[in-house]
Amino acid sequence: MDLSLYAREGEQEFVELTRSFVRKSVQPMFGGDAPDGNLDMVPSILDTAFEVGLAASPCSGMPGFEYGIWGTSADNPTGVRISATLLWAVAEACAGIAMNLHVQGLASRVITSSKGGLPDPPARVAIALQEGHALPGYRTLLGKGGGPDEGIGTRALSAKTGWVITGSKSFVYGMEGPDAFLVFCRIAGNQGGEKLGCLLVPAGATGLEVRDVGGRTGIRACGLSHLVLNEVKVASEHHLSSRDAFPLMGQAVCLHWLGISAMAAGNASGALKAAREYAATRYQGGAMIGEHPAVRKLLALSEARVEAALALLLQTAGFACGNTDFLRRCAIAKLMTTDWAFSAVTDALQVFGGYGYMEDYGMEKRLRDAVVLKTAAGSRNYLETFISDAGREDIR
């Protein structure tokens, strides 16, 4: 799908920069026989992404600070739309590389939008939003409080020089070798009770254990780990907000859902493009298979679903920033676009027949990535429940 047709005035330059990055840096990793590409090339690809300004960073002196994916320009709907579009473009080639850029930008956005930021922010950061198999419940995400069952059990206790954190975080995506982790946790309020805090934990902190999750279905080009925090000491200046960090978490979850939606749709668009190319060159029964009614139907369904995903993605980006309804809209986008994208990939894969399930054509990778994106950051059941509960909360 040609993203140029959807680019507004001023966006084309960003799209072309991303396409150049994909051609020169991402596509070469798929020249061999490895099903997920040459993963040894990922570090150099990400270094290039920082150099060209595609990867955001909380360090103001780095190229992507403002206009990288989820950089400071994403404080308005136009910037959100551009970041989502660029994620789409990268995911057309590799959803795993896109995930690296997405979560790096997500963590950077939380740091730069916090009050005062940090005096000396780290360049590469991973964000820990999840505990167990689900994100926090809707009351926590909407800033309404919530009990222990609301998904945040990690706690920070006040100490002489800062905080001491104990707990765990699950399924933390991030670039390999991050400098620090952003950890959301419960902390004691000044007037009793608890509030949500967001603390920056150095990667080498004593008591922090980073466990690789092991074998995975898809998105293998991006690191994935579990964090175990056993009385980890964090300096007071690494507390990102003296007030409740609910707005920071809400912002992060919004952009996380929107980013996953963009990557899922981009992955599906890449699958559709590959299926079209295959159908235009493969002969069966004396004619190109693209002329067969069954194949034409599969391509049409895949295209319709990709178009629908893009339309919903761009519409949702237009509602960005500042209200709880945006959170609900991003949940809807994540629910529907990942579902449409998964179906679009399976339709495109069937164009290849049995070859689609072999590693040679790259379609089985796209299917694996589509499965992961569909379930990451909230299952279908979680999203359906959240959308329903958030809607009722707005009515009250």
Image: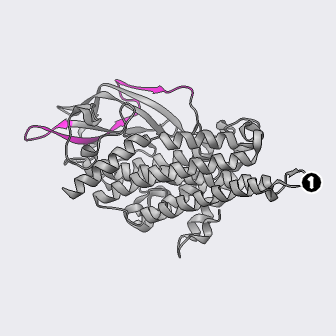
Q: Up-down: is 37 above or below 293?
A: above
Q: Up-down: is 74 above or below 222?
A: below
Residue at x-position 56% and y-position 54%: 265
| Position of residue 359 measured from the top left corner of the image (x, y, whole percent) | 73, 37
Q: How is the image coloured?
A: one colour
Q: Amino acid at mark 1?
A: Gly
Q: Is residue 214 magenta?
A: yes
Residue at x-position 20% and y-position 34%: 161
The residue tagged with tag 1: helix, strand or loop?
Answer: loop
| Position of residue 257 measured from the top left corner of the image (x, y, whole percent) | 43, 50
Residue at x-position 80% and y-position 56%: 292
Does residue 57 appear anywhere in the picture?
no
| Position of residue 39 measured from the top left corner of the image (x, y, whole percent) | 65, 37
Q: Find residue 320 and report its image quarter.
A: bottom left
The residue at which mark 1 appears reads as 286
Q: Nearer the viewer, residue 43 or 186?
A: 186
Q: Is residue 272 magenta?
A: no
Residue that sits furthest to the left in the current view: 191
